[in-house]
Image (cartoon, rainbow, N blue to C red):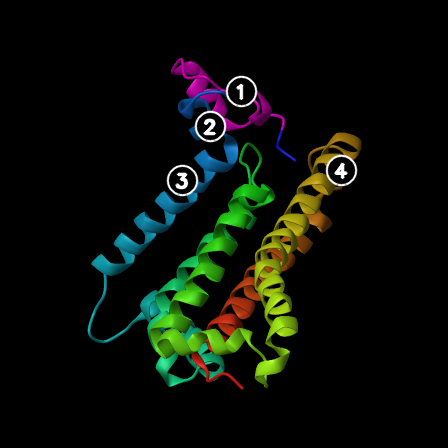
Amino acid sequence: MEHPILFLNILFEKMGLPVVGAEEAHTLTELVLQPHVTYAWLVMLILLVLAKLAASTLTMVPQGGQNFFETVLTGIEEFMIGITGEHGRFLFPLIASLGLFILCSNYMGMVPGFFAPTANINTTAACALIVVVFTHVLGVKFHGVQYVKHFMGPVWWLTPLIMPIELIGHGARVLSLSIRLFGNVFGEELVLGILFFLAGLYLAPLPMMFLGLFTGFIQAFIFCLLSMMYFAGAMEHAH
């Protein structure tokens, strides 16, 4: 659910750019100016600026904020390696990027005048597709043609039964990742919108907003955790 007023929409209207609903978009410009696209780009811009600022202040001896963030990132990396194994360390930039993007997107919807990109199924489906496609890229990278054994089952005569089930299961991963994230964030947006409308702009929605801080983090964590498990499954040997 979108906020009644979206700052980027107002800015685009002042610039004379077309701002229409998703069902009314007919040109590429109108599609690009959809809230879930523009606010996704805003999240990416914020992350890039923060990364640039962080990189410009790095020191050989960590102090203050650098020490804190290095501890957090190291902890996340070690947690990931516990799931994927040491040979999965190179996956950390992808996992961290997805996690930060989803977390910031979830939290952006809690700011009046902004929109959570993850409250739109297109954004969550794009993230899920990246994970699922890269899972199979990893499988081919680590096992070559033998990766097909992951879909064939333990014995050859079960392949006609097991392979369709495996293919459906891997396709369902896209739905599982995208709908879970979208449903939770959209539901939170919907409840906040109802509370703003019925109970005012201040104290009444606060408990839901505090809960949103927790659920926004949990949803980003679950998405990354499932991604790690998919990557680990693709890299391990087929049984």
Task: Tell me how far mark 2 sits from mark 4, CA to CA.
Answer: 30 Å
Residue tagged 3? 41
Q: Which sits in the foreground, 79 or 23?
A: 23
Tell me the tag on residue 93. Answer: none
Residue tagged 4? 195
Q: Which amino acid does label 2 sit on?
A: Leu
Tell me the tag on residue 31. Answer: 2
Quarter containing the C terminus? bottom right
Residue 227, compared with residue 53, is above or below; it is: below
Horizontal relation, residue 92 to residue 182: left or right: left
Q: What residue type is labelled 3?
A: Trp
Residue 26 locus on image (x, y percent): 49, 20
Q: Is mark 2 on a helix, strand or loop?
A: helix
Residue 62 locus on image (x, y percent): 27, 73
Residue tagged 1? 20
Task: Tell me how far mark 1 sits from mark 2, CA to CA.
Answer: 9 Å
